[in-house]
Image (spheres, rainbow, N blue to C red):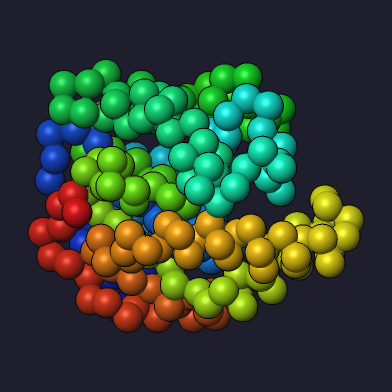
Amino acid sequence: MGVVDELAAAILALQRQRPVRVLIEGRSAAGKTTFSRTLAERLGRSGRQAQVVHLDDFHPVGYRPLGSAAYTPERYLQRGFDFAAFERLVLEPTREGGDGAISFALPGGFEDSPAGGTTLGVGALLIVEGVFLLKPGLRHWWDFVIWLDVSFATMVRRATARDVAWVGDADLVRHRYETFWTAAHALYEAGDPRGAAHAVIDNEDPATPRLVRPVASGASAP
């Protein structure tokens, strides 16, 4: 059984009287977007509704990519995303007895963010991918957490290759990740978010993800 199949089996075994909340976490450029899409496709083949939501679509109104001079790593952990709106628009509707009506993005955010939303029924699978979503105040939301492991060197290399297309300056991207982003992730990881994961995946080679922590059985919120 492959890694994705093993994860899917564990997630599909979860029984909730509401949508099941799955989180894919890890450092920037760890491969979360691609992994979430692959997992959603696999879960969807079960016949259950599987919907991916990206935290990157919940930056505060007026946010500028690469971060602003107004952000320190500490401030970014608190305000780089509109966490309160994310809870209100995505997580709160999936409480037991909630209406399941989630939004795909923060209204008034990036122009290319997806519009609208969908309604998740009991047993549907909400797959969220993003960073900093295992802060202590947010950990209780998740039924199943997957942490994608990559080194800081891999993060910088991948982010530089990815972001130079729209930034236009590889040295600028590299410097930003070697300083600001490395510091932000190190600060966040001091709280051991990785330790809250139900499964840890070595994603240094995204073509061959490797399970380095066995999938927890009967997973529940960390």
Q: Nearer the viewer, residue 100 or 138?
A: 138
Q: Nearer the viewer, residue 140 or 73?
A: 73
Question: Where's residue 6, x and y in %?
Answer: 28, 70
Vertical relation: 161 (above or below) 56? below
Q: Number of labelled discs?
A: 0
Left or right of 218 on screen, residue 87: right
Q: Is residue 114 visible?
A: no
Q: Based on the displayed image, in which of its 4 quarters is residue 182 positioned? A: bottom right
Which residue: 22% across, 70% down?
215
Which residue: 53% across, 42% down?
75
Which residue: 31% across, 64% down?
192
Picture quarter with the N terminus: bottom left
Question: Where's residue 222, x and y in %?
Answer: 19, 54
Q: Nearer the viewer, residue 182 or 19?
A: 182
Question: Where's residue 126, x and y in %?
Answer: 34, 41
Question: Where's residue 26, x and y in %?
Answer: 45, 62
Left or right of 147 on screen, residue 172: right
